[in-house]
Amino acid sequence: MNQHCGAAAVQPHCNRGETAVKGGPVPYAIRCGDVMPGCAAEFHADEESDLLDHIVRHAAEAHADVELTPAIRSAVQEAIRTVG
Ligand SMILES: [Zn+2]
């Protein structure tokens, strides 16, 4: 069960509302499934660089067989959504 990034990431661990009150809505989000079809992991961050950090770490754990080629990286960057 080392796939904590899969199911756990889509569960709001912070459902007490603290994050929303403190930091407001996080502006950057990415669905791993947009880049790696079939993956349910989702990440949110305040900074684009944090988000990339999350996804790179997740990819290393959950998609160790996928090489992070420049093409994959640019696909990742295109998959990043900014939330108003
Ligand atoms: Zn994934």
Image (tube, rainbow, N blue to C red):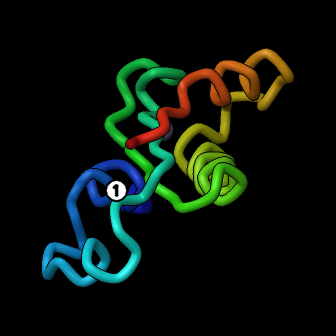
Percent from the top left, x then y, of residue 33?
41, 26
Q: Indicate left or right for 6 with 20 as reference.
A: right
The residue most toward the front is: 84
- Within 10 angstroms of label 1, few (less than 14), some, or many (20 or more) residues? some
Q: Indicate left or right for 25 with 2 as reference.
A: left
Q: How many marks?
A: 1
Q: Indicate left or right for 26 with 73 as reference.
A: left
State whether residue 8 is above or below residue 63.
below
State whether residue 65 is above or below residue 29.
above
Q: Quadrant of the C terminus?
A: top left
Would you say the beta carbon of the disc 1 residue lies within 8 angstroms of ligand 1? no
- Give the structural element (helix, strand or loop) at label 1: helix
Residue type at mark 1 is: Ala
Residue at left offset 50%, top offset 23%: 36
Percent from the top left, x then y, of residue 54?
60, 56
The image quadrant of residue 67 is: top right
Q: Indicate left or right for 51 with 22 as reference.
A: right
The image quadrant of residue 73 is: top right
Provide the residue designation for mark 1.
9
Residue at left offset 65%, top offset 49%: 48
The residue most toward the left is: 16
Front in this rendered view, residue 78 or 65:
78
Residue at left offset 36%, top offset 49%: 6
Q: Quadrant of the N terminus?
A: bottom left
Front in this rendered view, residue 20 or 37:
20
